[in-house]
Amino acid sequence: MDWEVTVQINNLTAGYGGQPVLYDIHLQVGEGRIVGLLGPNGSGKTTLMRCINSIIKPLQGEVQVRGQNVNKLDRMHIARLVSLVPQKTSAVFSYSCEDMIIMGMTPRLNLWSKPGRAAHARARQVCEEIGIADLLEHSFNQLSGGQQQLVLLARALLQNTPVMLLDEPTSHLDFSNQHRVLGLMLGMARSRGVTSIITLHDPNLALYYCDEVVILKEGRIIAGGQSRQVMNTSNLCQAFGENIEVDSTGKGLRVVVPRTIAVS
Amino acid sequence: MKKIWIALLVFAVISVIAALCLGRYPIHPGEVLCLLLAKLGLTNWLPGAVEEKSIVFWNIRFPRVILSFVVGAGISVAGCIFQALFRNPLAAPDILGVSAGACFGAALAMMVFPQFVLGIHGMAFGVGTFAVFLAFTLASRSPSQSAAVLVLAGIVVAALFQAGLSLLMYLANPYDQLARIVFWIMGSFQVASWDKVQVVVPVLVSCMLLVVAFGWRLNILSQEDEEALALGVDVKKWRVFYVIISTLLVASSVSAVGTISWLGLIIPHISRFLVGSEQRRLMAVSAILGGSLMLLMDTCARSLFESEIPISIVTSLIGAPFLAYLVLSRKGGGLGSDRPN
């Protein structure tokens, strides 16, 4: 079957304690696309992700993943469709990285079983792909924030879902790892058709890696579409304030910079 | 890892032998062997002195050893479950008020129908589980469904039953009822019998086997709720399952032998230090270690002085300083860490 539209959001209004935070969201994401969610703090990016993963139920409207309304599916079924890379986790008990990563196998296990040798081999393979095989034996709690983010990414990759949600996956990563992770997502999108929805704070990363960008402000989409079209000075100023500009380098590369730097 | 398992099993065997041999009527390990072989029908010969001891051995000491090992194991496994479930290394098995409820129930039964021993155990079990049900009902009325709300509800319920218990102790006859209530609250395996073994052991063993079989999901539940949901685990449903099992473990133990302090808190920490945080491994190790240490502590409780000391005094005397040692020996690693840095 050809899944042209992987994620479809219709008329979504959602919030907490009956108070809406997102209003009337419409969004279609195609298979193998990378969508960046941009917007100032409190604009509703994380809430939108929680709705796609059915962590919170919509007050109105629906979210479909591969044609199925996620609110009508059980958790195990949702976890086979959508995986999540949280921005950080506060693990109280110190699991080894291997134990943490192998948790990604849970949606594939039946009630009684635990991950077997094949799962451990797969976990090792995923870690080699993203260059953290040397961390497997380490205690998760003793890693740096960036290394923890990579372990959480490996766990989501092991979950092997058609849709991945990444909540600010680059927030603790150094420059090189930021581009490594987003490059990896781009590779997954192109080679395996994995759809990624990523919240980002750096508009430049959205410009370089995202096929589409959705800009949110105060719970509403103020612009959405092809990243080249959406990422313009007008839209970004509307979202983040007047002090922002999309400029071009001598080599024709577009960059988003604060206006003070662009002028100088 | 293999070495740790072998060491644990050796430790368990030594604990069992020590518990079988030591006591007010010391029995030599050779005599213990004779008694066991005779029971299995492998020998008909028993030295005269051993024959005399066989009544003490089979009717008092052997059921006591079985009960204390299984109760120690059950409480330790319940401790692992509660610490993972509430993501709190300081959570003890009575965090939802089960022990306070059971003590209140037992004290009430001792005052209303003091001669009816089964009624005391039944009331302890019934009120203990009712206390947890009350905590759950209270927490379900809160708009927030987080584990912290359930813990708060447990604290409220425990405080209410504690107040009820204090009132009962105030009203109790100081010459007979009060002493009985106090001794029961502090716990003792003196009451061990084959009847109790037959009632309590099957419940505890089946609960432990069940949680170890489903243990993988406890790893996921020890992550944040949002992550657990994203990994396909229905947090609410599984939390109820684990609370029911651990309540059964604690209520059955407390109703049989009274309160046992500290064990459920410290054993998971020692086990985590030995084998890490993976819950299936952790619960299995905690069961063996908790059972063995319970045996040794009970052996101390009944052998050190002329009259038997309540078990909670021994567990507190050993448990509290040990927890202090654990806290002080962690250089940078939190209490939840599996190994010191």
Image: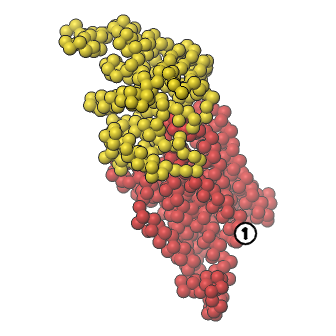
Chain colours: A yellow, B red
Q: Quadrant of residue A72?
A: top right
Q: Is residue B132 left or right of residue A164?
A: right
The total of numbered circles placed on residues is 1
Q: Secondary structure at mark 1?
A: helix
> Can you give x and y, in whole percent of width and height, for residue B264 in the image?
54, 56
Most extreme residue toward the front is: A1
**Foreground residue, B17 or A78?**
A78
> Can you give x and y, in whole percent of width and height, for residue B180 in the image?
69, 64
**Foreground residue, B255 or A161?**
A161
Q: Is residue A189 above or below residue B93?
A: above
Q: Is residue A220 above or below residue A182?
A: above
Q: Quadrant of residue B232?
A: top right
Q: Is residue A123 left or right of residue A110?
A: left
Q: Is residue A94 visible?
A: no
Q: Quadrant of residue A264?
A: top left
Q: Residue at x 43, y 33 (%)?
A: A85
Q: Residue at x 66, y 88 (%)?
A: B52
- Name the residue tied to disc 1: B195
**Foreground residue, B186 or A258?**
A258
Mark 1 Cα within 10 Å, few/some/many (few <14, many 20+)?
few
**Foreground residue, B267 or A112?**
A112
Q: Residue at x 61, y 31 (%)?
A: A73
Chain identity of mark 1: B
> Can you give x and y, in whole percent of width and height, for residue A5 in the image?
51, 21
> Can you give x and y, in whole percent of width and height, for residue B75 in the image?
58, 58
Q: Is residue A165 above or below residue B177?
A: above
Q: Amino acid at mark 1?
A: Asp
Q: Residue at x 53, y 40 (%)?
A: A107
